[in-house]
Image (tube, coloured by chain):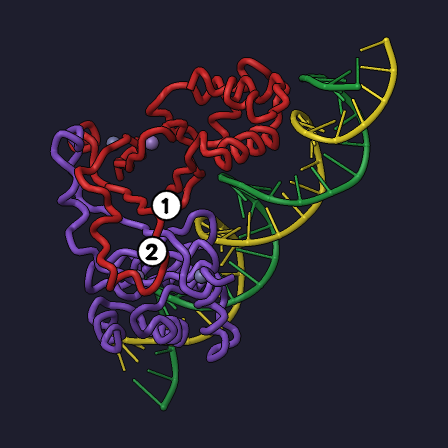
Chain colours: A red, B purple, C yellow, D green
DNA sequence: TCTTGACTTGGACTGCGTCCATCGTAGGAT
DNA sequence: ATCCTACGATGGACGCAGTCCAAGTCAAGA
């Protein structure tokens, strides 16, 4: 993710301080922040940054394939910079913690063609739910 | 689903015209309506029914296990009376159509224990995405 | 340094859902 | 059949996540 800024420059992005700080906040794997969390962390470095710009930048990163949107049952979407290797998510029903997980088989392989009803199926998103070790005790 | 009203009576539900008409709207399998769609169809039979009551009744049906909530990426939740047989969903990225599908294997079986990180994993929700036959042409 | 169009901003706005005070009524008691 | 009351219905205010817009700003090429 540290060479993200290079890739974006190469794609013709105008490099602004706002975009730079949003990209820095998203640095690292295993990060699953909401837009407001991204905004809060970005504002530590750049206090005037607006929510609209954070939403715009996240949306651009998503459509460039640099960041993945993770939908959560009724709360705010989470933004995941781990767009390199395909993975799925394990969510704690107690505290909401999100972990990256890697199933043994491609989930798409388990949908037989007679269950596809003529659709051209391209992706399968899996959300595993359960209780994390600390929520299990409580 | 036609004996749903019986089961609810047995659970101590006070039977009102509003609850009856919501249950009737949800009758049948392969139904995936939003709360507002349920409200619109219920209002054909009972024009004064309020949105709040539809939300209350749907919430009660969900916590009784009679109806399943299906989260959709950023739009309204859909309510699914097919709570009997476990199944997953195939969603058209074009028009939003939802189909019930039955994968060949239990999706939980494909998450090895070393990928569970001490969680007690209880469910796996799979959303397959693609284009339906008519959206493929357009 | 100048110019320009891409980018940013804050606030209004929308969609989806929840909350709450008040009113109505299902269904047991008499 | 009538009464009583706790449970349910109502609709309007409210909240959150996200979008849109007109106006101001600035990155970067000439
Ligand atoms: Mn992830
Ligand atoms: Mn279904
Ligand atoms: Zn937990
Ligand atoms: Zn379609």
In the depicted view, which residue is nearer to us: B85 or D1?
B85
Mark 2 closeness class: few <14, some 14–19, many ≥20 residues within 10 Å = many
Question: Where residue B81 appears, x then y in whole percent?
Answer: 30, 66
Which residue is pictured at 47% across the width and 68% down the height? Answer: B39
Q: Kindly tell me whether residue A41 is visible in this rendering.
A: no
- Specify the quadrant of the image occupied by residue B19: bottom left
Is D20 displayed left or right of B136 in the figure?
right
The quarter of the rendering in which ligand 1 is drawn is top left
Residue annotated with mark 1: A73
Above or below, A48 against C27 in this view is above
- Label 2, secondary structure: give it: strand
- Label 1, secondary structure: give it: loop
Above or below, B76 against A7 in this view is below
User: Mark 2 falls within which chain?
Assistant: B
- The answer to whether marks 2 and 1 mark residues whose Cβ atoms lie closer than 8 Å is yes
On-image quarter of the N terminus of chain B = bottom left
Which label belongs to residue B104?
none
Question: Where residue A130 appears, x then y in whole percent?
Answer: 21, 39
Question: Where residue B17 appears, x then y in whole percent?
Answer: 39, 76
Above or below, B40 against A53 in this view is below
Mark 1 closeness class: few <14, some 14–19, many ≥20 residues within 10 Å = some
Residue annotated with mark 2: B69
Is B47 displayed left or right of A101 in the figure?
right
Cα separation, mark 2 vs mark 1, equals: 9 Å
């Amino acid at each position: 993710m540290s060479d993200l800024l290079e890739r974006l420059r190469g794609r013709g992005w105008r490099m602004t301080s706002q975009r730079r700080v949003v990209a820095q906040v998203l640095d690292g794997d295993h990060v699953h922040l909401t837009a407001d969390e991204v905004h809060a962390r970005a504002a530590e470095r750049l206090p005037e940054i607006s929510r609209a710009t954070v939403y715009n930048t996240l949306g651009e990163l998503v459509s460039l394939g640099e960041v993945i949107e993770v939908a959560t049952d009724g709360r705010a979407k989470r933004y995941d910079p781990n767009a390199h290797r395909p993975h799925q998510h394990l969510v704690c029903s107690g505290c909401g913690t999100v972990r990256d997980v890697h199933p043994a088989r491609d989930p798409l392989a388990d949908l037989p063609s007679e269950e596809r009803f003529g659709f051209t199926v391209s992706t399968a998103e899996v959300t595993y739910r359960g209780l994390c070790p600390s929520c299990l005790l409580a």
